[in-house]
Image: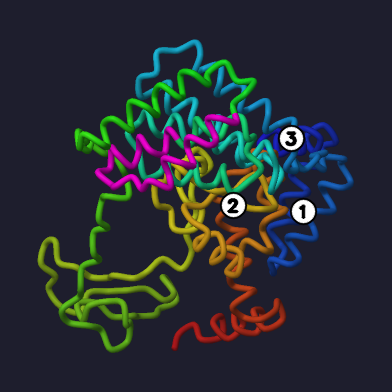
Amino acid sequence: MAYHRDKLMFALLKADKYFDVMDSFQKLKTDQERVIFTFNIIWENGVIPNVINKRKNAKDSERLRKEGNNIFVNCNLSDNPCINALNFYTGSISFAPYPSLQLALAFGNRSFILYILDLYSECIQDIDRALALNYPNDLKGKLFIRKMQCLIALGNPIEEDMIKETEHWISEMTMNPNKLKMQAKLDGLRRKIEQGNIQSSPVRSEESKSEIPLPVIKSCNNEIPCASDAIFLKYDKQYGRHVVAARNIDAGELLVVEKSYSLLVTQEKRLTHCSNCLKVCWATIPCKNCVYTLYCSEQCRDIAWKKYHDMECDIFTIMWLCECSDTDFLSLRLAVQAVKEAGNIKRLRTMLKKVDESEGT
């Protein structure tokens, strides 16, 4: 985006039109006029970004999964390389067609990294997701062994049916050179279970961290529901509508507690944080349509789709490829939420007009 901005500025300077364009822009009175004017300038100077939207595809998913495999094979799997491999596998998950073999394989590979990181609950989630898809039969034995190891680490009981199912899928590994190794692991786990020699392992999980409750305002404001009575709204021509103190305010005194109207995970955190609730999640699941957003659960994915993502879905990936800023992403989400809550653009304009006309009241 910065490249196209600089390109447009250079074109205007070269044509000796830059200052004329800026003067004309400053005389515009509405946002609609500014948008139309800017688009026409971009069009006239041929600076429209030529961006091909990235769709889910097996090729990119395979490429990212192999990058994760390379880290896994060539690096000492301490925390940092593990996180790097995990991010590549999550990227593979985001690009994999839904549903597909590539998605199943990426979930399976990521489950191993989660196991190494002692994220056992998250590992089980990914194993179940891989098995629910068309995961290859000759590889399922590995996942069942891993799931048993996670359950033991969590101190959970292992049912006999699961042992039998694990044994069945190991027997299906006819062409897999790891068959004997998997059978030996199963025999070892079975002996531990029979002898009662099972000890839970230390668990590292973001899920175990309880959310910090929001503080409560003791004396509420009649005019501003989310604020304390220590402040009130005021209007004047110099500052417009603003908040001032209604009394002496103690150091550290709580003034406002308000739930965010809109949330947005930054681009650098999109692989490890839920796009809806922003919670840290090492086992995210993808949007079924775009390659950009990931979620901590099906519930968050459904909430986001109904609230805003159905309209922003195709646009976010293009903005990402254009290297738009996080502020640009948030601006789009705010606009989408406002339009959906108002019902349509016409109603939103009416609401905004009423707000503008209420200045001074």
Name the spot of residue 111 as percent of width and height, x first.
47, 35
Q: Is residue 254 rendered to the left or right of residue 358?
A: left
Q: Is residue 23 magenta?
A: no
Separation (CA) of disc 3 from disc 1: 38 Å
Give the extent of the magenta segment: 145-172
Tell me the quarter of the picture where residue 321 sits.
top right
Q: How many marks?
A: 3
Separation (CA) of disc 2 from disc 3: 27 Å
Q: Is residue 283 rendered to the left or right of residue 21?
A: left
Name the spot of residue 256 as percent of width and height, x first.
27, 70
Q: Are marks 2 and 1 in contact (CB under 8 Å)?
A: no
Secondary structure, mark 1, is helix
Q: Is residue 23 rendered to the left or right of residue 90?
A: right
Name the dominant secondary structure of the magenta segment: helix
**Which of the two marks, 3 or 1, is nearer to us in this view?**
3
Secondary structure, mark 3, is helix
Q: Quadrant of the C terminus?
A: bottom left
Secondary structure, mark 2, is helix
In the image, what residue occupies the spot 27% across and 76% down? 227
**Dot 3, crowdedness within 10 Å: few (<14), some or many (≥20)?**
some
The residue labelled by disc 3 is 58
Disc 3 marks a residue whose amino acid type is Ala
The residue labelled by disc 2 is 329
Which mark is drawn over residue 38? 1
Q: Earlier in the sequence, mark 3 or mark 1?
A: 1
Q: Is residue 349 above or below residue 120?
A: below
Name the spot of residue 268 as percent of width and height, x first.
50, 38
Q: Earlier in the sequence, mark 2 or mark 3?
A: 3
Q: Nearer the viewer, residue 6 or 103?
A: 103
